[in-house]
Image (spheres, helix red, strand yellow):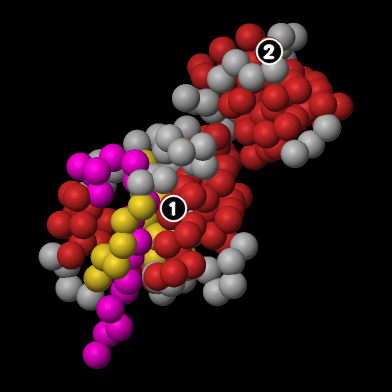
Amino acid sequence: MTKTVTVLLVDDHPVVRAGLRALLSSSDGIDVVGEASGGVEGVALVRSLAPDVVLMDLQMGDGVDGVEATKRIGALESPPHVLILTTYDTDADILRAVEAGASGYLLKDAPTQQLVDAVHAAARGETVLAPPVASRLMNRLRSGRPELSGRELEVLSLVASGKPNKAISKQLFVSEATVKSHLVHIFTKLDVDSRTAAVSKARDLGLLR
């Protein structure tokens, strides 16, 4: 008999969680054991419920986004597999999630069966990427576009949100000198000479939202 896969839903939209619960609960071999509305609550429920798979949104409003929550879950003893389920498919989002330890990256417009299959695949320890995400990663490898590292994309994302170097250094737990070093590398790779130009070019290239 096939083992039932236990799933925890982490998303700050109640309607989305209700839809996912209804969809997954009606599928054979999947049991939704809990829901969380934010990253902090999600990590806590992983500790208490020990699910096989966590379906994790990226953007949440409690100060701990899906990437940070994924990192914290990965640091736990015998962590579950984390599947990112989001509307965002930029390079920055995908790379940050993968580097945080996510087992897969799916988009919220995925067909029902694709999502169900992805949950089972993740539970088996397989990597799952939505076709558009896989295409983006392949195009990134094949193209002549500038290659920014995951940390460089993270720094640039914070710059795009309007944070100064001091705030970025505090959020990433690095020195301001390190932030400035990352920016120098970013400017060089993108062939720009300002923060504004770097953000604009990164968005044009699909590296940032």
Q: Residue furthest bottom?
A: 1
> As shown in the figure, which amino acid type bears the numbered disc 2?
Arg
Label 1 or label 2, whichever comes before in sequence order? 1
Which residue corresponds to mark 2?
195
Quadrant in the rendering for residue 31 = bottom left
Q: Residue at x 58, y 56 (%)?
A: 72
16 is within the stretch colored magenta:
yes
Quadrant in the rendering for residue 14 = top left
Q: Residues within 10 Å of mark 1 (few under 14, many from 20)?
A: some
- Residue 48 in the image: state x and y as whole percent: 44, 69
Q: Secondary structure at mark 1?
A: helix
- Residue 203 in the image: state x and y as whole percent: 52, 19
Q: Is residue 119 visible?
A: no
Q: Residue at x 58, y 66 (%)?
A: 76
Give the number of the mark in front: 1 or 2.
1
Q: Secondary structure at mark 2?
A: helix
Q: CA distance from mark 1 to mark 2?
A: 35 Å
* 7 displayed left or right of 30: right
Q: Residues within 10 Å of mark 2 (few under 14, many from 20)?
A: some
Please say if the residues under marks 1 and 2 sit with CB atoms less than 8 Å apart. Answer: no
* 178 displayed left or right of 57: right
Quadrant in the rendering for residue 185 = top right
Give the answer, above or below, for where 168 lies relative to 55: above
Front one among 177 and 123: 177
Q: Is residue 14 visible?
A: yes
* 66 displayed left or right of 198: left
Q: Residue at x 64, y 19 (%)?
A: 163
- Residue 187 in the image: state x and y as whole percent: 74, 18
110 is within the stretch colored magenta:
no
Q: Residue furthest right?
A: 177
Which residue corresponds to mark 1?
41
Q: Which residues are magenta?
A: 1-17
